[in-house]
Each structure stands twice: as structure tokens, then as C-alpha cells.
Image: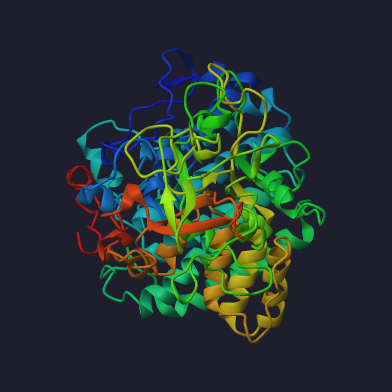
Amino acid sequence: MKIKIFSAALVFVSAVMFSGCVKTNLDANPTNTLLETNMFSDRALIQSVLANFYISVNYGQQNGDFGSYHLLDEASTMYGPATTTDNERQIPRNFYRVYDYGLVRRMNQFIQGINSANAKTALLESDRLDMEAQCKFLRAWYYFCMARSIGGMPLVGDEVFEYQSEADIPKMQIPRATEAATYRYIINQCDVAATNLSASKTVNGAVANRWAALMLKARAAVYAASIAKYGSSVTPSVRTQGGEAGIPADSAAAFYRIAFETAERVINQSPYVLQKDASNPGLAFYRATSVKSGNTEVIWAFDRLAPNQVTQFTNWVMPYSHRDYTEGNNLGAVLNLVEAFENKDGSDPAIRTNNANGSYVFYNSAEDPFTAKDARLWGTVIWPSAPYRNVPVILQAGQLNRSGNDYIIKAGATGSVDASGELVTSINGPVSNSNNYVNKTGFLVRKFLDETANAGLNPRFSEMWMPKFRIAEAYLIAAESGFELGDRIPTALQYINVVRSRGNIQPLTLATFTFAKIVNEYRVEFAFEDHRFWDLKRWRLAHTIWNGTLNNLTAQMYSLYPYKVVAPGDPNNGKWAFQRLISYKRATTPLYFPLTNYYGTIDNSWITNNPKLVVNPLQ
């Protein structure tokens, strides 16, 4: 009888077809090993293996890697000089590509082991079924993350391949499934997992429950539906002949129905509700995404707990003027994102900087242009003079001084003052230079910035989580899929307005409810939450919005510099004006997403191990 060796994190040698895989930077490499018979007889060891799977699937944009935000139209990193290379201009084709069948094999071995006689003796049956369901959910999440970046890939089910001789190799060389079949498999596995997962909330959303499985089902369905609809109509050439990439247009309606019905089930039956506070909606939105205590909205999250799991996001991103440690101001939200937030009165969301005759538009305070906006903006970015830890964050590029009939800009070094002691340029900036610790966009990032004292301090840093699913997404999936189905638009309208209401912006009507409004709602609701990149891909909008053209309003990144009027005796003395600029860090590098990027590459090494794999379009 063959003896199987398990590590405490279930690390195994991959089967032939799966070698050369890409792994996450959070994968552990434990050295201790245990016999299978011992491991599945010990509840603590079983739980430790399952916990490692949660760490291993922390894919995509996340607040443990703030630098990746620089690659999209939400924020830019601030340290150092402007980026000038083509690599910085083009969003990488394999951005967050996932391909780790070694992980799938370990999960399948876990599922096999959790069904062994030893596990059935060591665990209560309800606990055993729940752990098995968690693993199946995490495996479905893995397949989803792979599909959204590569398309259809081999589906191995629960099988654990064993290599005895070369005769075993052909059965391991499984061809790619179609992209549609891959999404159907994910949807099916979510149903299987949901059956035995708890319907109750879990602590900090760290453990997947029934609603996390149903959220994944709804998201997978709406992704597949939009790829079917827009891939066929907008990018018909970006597909493979066998359907490994690309989904037939006639599949869209069925996927949209699954998405709509599943999202409604989460809305109506789950214990999660949107967090709102009419007295302070901006703060309520911040708490809905970035505060664990009392949270009613986050369904599943990558949680952190010191000392083993922490993030330095706060250390690097917090205002330098408020710093806990040695860093700060290393991520600046761009004006493109800020202007995506609607004004409460429905007026043009573009921030007015000049009148028709070219003169400055003056504001009574530095906050005036932003308090007029969707309240969710406050919970997403730090604008000039907005508070962090109850202390205003001064963002001032310089002064406007009067010279005859004109105003002239006076700027200085960060932290400089004039002869009268008036601040010229804030220690935070913004300024357009290559210095570190200074903002270069006019805005900082608030979402995921920890307000806890010393959260930016070494060595403990922050326990800030990274939400994967929030109840708000169920509302937007129901709104989107209902809109696309055509016969459920009134209900879909109600759902999108529920989300919009948290920002105190005007509700949509049947006349104003458009696809463009849906696109924008996802953008502002889920900024920095790993949605923007994937949404524009599935809607086939990425290559038109990020077209690489200089001075294009959606590809070029912009900044907004605030100036205080310092002109004693002038009627505008003490007021504020703003200057719209091309963002210093991306002045010559507008975002570029070519058609090739809709699907990541199938590497030659993968094909060497499995000749049945076909390459992706335009590869």
C-alpha cells in the first residue's frame, strides 16, 4: 500500500501537466510533514490546512500591494520621478493571471482526505461537511480567478492524479474546457458548496459561508453573461475557434437570469444590509468598507490579524503630515476617479477651475468642490482639508497672489511659508517633482487607510482586511442583469437606486437608467476593491477607455492642484482656486490596453507539459 505524505499546508509535487505554474506571493513553504492518517485524525491540523488555502487564493488587486493601483485609472504611486517607459504605459497582458494546478491538486487531496474514515471519526459530521464545502468554494474561487484572466482551462473535478509511470501522462494532459463550460462549472460548484455552508455571518467575513458562495455564483454568472454579449458584439475576433476564449452570444440571457436570481436571493435572504447613516453618509461608507467592528456589509474578506498577517498600506499611504513611522503620501487618487462621482444636484461632475473667459473659479473653502459630490467620495479619497484621524489634511500646491489685474501662482518647497508666515506649499504637496513623501495628484486614498492609532507603525502595522464580496455588489449585479434582460428593468432600477441612495445623489428614472450609469456605479462603489480592471474587460470597454492616446480624457491621468488666494484687500483673499493638470507621474504614459490583453497568454512551458492546450487569441 502506498503511503501518502502531507505537509501541514498540503504542499505536493504537481502532476506533469501542471508543472511550471504561477503561485501567489503569499504561498507558504512549510518543511514539516505528516502522515495522512495522522493529519485527518486531528481537527487542528485539518483547520490549519484549510486556513492555508484561504491565504493561497488571495488573488488580484489588494491592499497588501498598493503599488499595483498605479496601473489603473484610480490612483498613482507618488514616489520618484515620472514614469516614461512603454512598460509603464501598457497594462500588462498577464495582470493578475492565475495558473496553479498544484493548488488544485492539494485541494482535491484535502477533499479526498476530509471524506476518509479518520476525518469522519475526528469531526462532527456538520463540521466535516462545512470544511469540505469551504474547500470547494475556495477551489471555485480559484477557477473563477483563472477564468477571468485566461478564459477556459482544464477542469479536473475532484480527481487526484497519481504518477506511476509514463503511461499515466496522457490521462493528465486534459484539454482546455470552453470559457462557457468553465463558468458553468464555477456556478455548479458554488451551488454544491452553498448546500453545506453556514447561513450565519462569520467573524470578519474570514470564513466563507453560504452567501459568499452565492455571491461568487452571481458574479461568475454576470461575468459570463457580459462576455457573451459584449465579446460577441464588440470584440468578435478575440476568441478561439474551439470556444476556449469567448462565449456565444446566445448564452448571455441564461447567464444573466442566473445572476439576477442569485443576487436577489442574497439581497432577500442573507443577514447582510447596506451600511448607511443619514447624518454622516461619507463616514458610513468608509466604515462599510474599512472598519470590521459592527460591519453589516462585508460578506467575505481576506482578513488580517497581527502578528502573522498585517499590511503596511497605512504606513505607505497615510498623509505624511500625519505619519506614524517613516513613510507616507505614496499613493495619490487621480482626478479621473474623483470626477466619476456625481454631484448631489445632478450638475456636471467635472470640477470647474476656470470661467469661460479663462479666469479662475473661486471657492470659499478648499473642500467646496467635493462636499457637493456623492457622499461616497469622502469614504474613498482624502481631498484638500478633509480630516484623517480627526485632523485636517492640508493639501496646498501654493498661493495665488495679486499682481495688477492678474493672479500669479507662487509655489515653494514642501512646508514653506512666506514672509508673513502664511503657508505657501504644504508638507504634503501637491507638487510636480521627483521627491518622495509628497503627493502629486491633489488627493490621497482613504479607503483601507486604518484610523487606528499607530496602524502605520513598525512592526505591528495594520490588520486592515481586504473585502472580496459586499452586499452592495448583490444590488448592482441584480441591477445590471435585470437591465440587460430587458423585462426586469423597473426592479433593476430599484436596486441601483438603493446603492445610489447611500451617496445622497439623485435617483435614476426609467429615462436616465442607462448602461453607462451601471458602469459608473461599479466604478465609484468599488474603487480600489479589485473590480475596475475586470469590469472593463468583461464589458469589452477596456481597449476604448484605456486607448493609450495622449490627452485623451479617459486614458490620460489628471491631477487637481489647490491654491489659496493670499492677496490682502482683494475680495477673493482667503478663497481657493484649482488648476487641472496632466498627472506628473503619468504625463507621457496614458493607460493602454490593447486587444491582446482581454486574455492572458498560455505559456510555452505549459504547452510543453500538455500539448492539448491551445493558445489564446492574438498570442
Q: Quadrant of residue 432?
A: top left
Q: Quadrant of residue 495?
A: bottom right
Give percent across and percent down for residue 57. 48, 39
Q: Is residue 551 above or below residue 213?
A: below
Give percent across and percent down for residue 527. 54, 53
Q: Nearer the viewer, residue 1 or 283?
A: 283
Q: Nearer the viewer, residue 361 or 611?
A: 361
Q: Is residue 158 visible?
A: no
Q: How are the colours assigned in the image?
A: rainbow
Give percent across and percent down for residue 32. 45, 12
Number of on-image labels: 0
Q: Residue at x 68, y 34 (%)?
A: 389
Q: Is residue 427 visible?
A: yes
Q: Nearer the viewer, residue 279 or 246?
A: 279
Q: Residue at x 67, y 75 (%)?
A: 492
Q: Quadrant of residue 1?
A: top left
Give percent across and percent down for residue 335. 47, 57
- Please state if 189 lies on the left or on the right of 120 as rendered: left
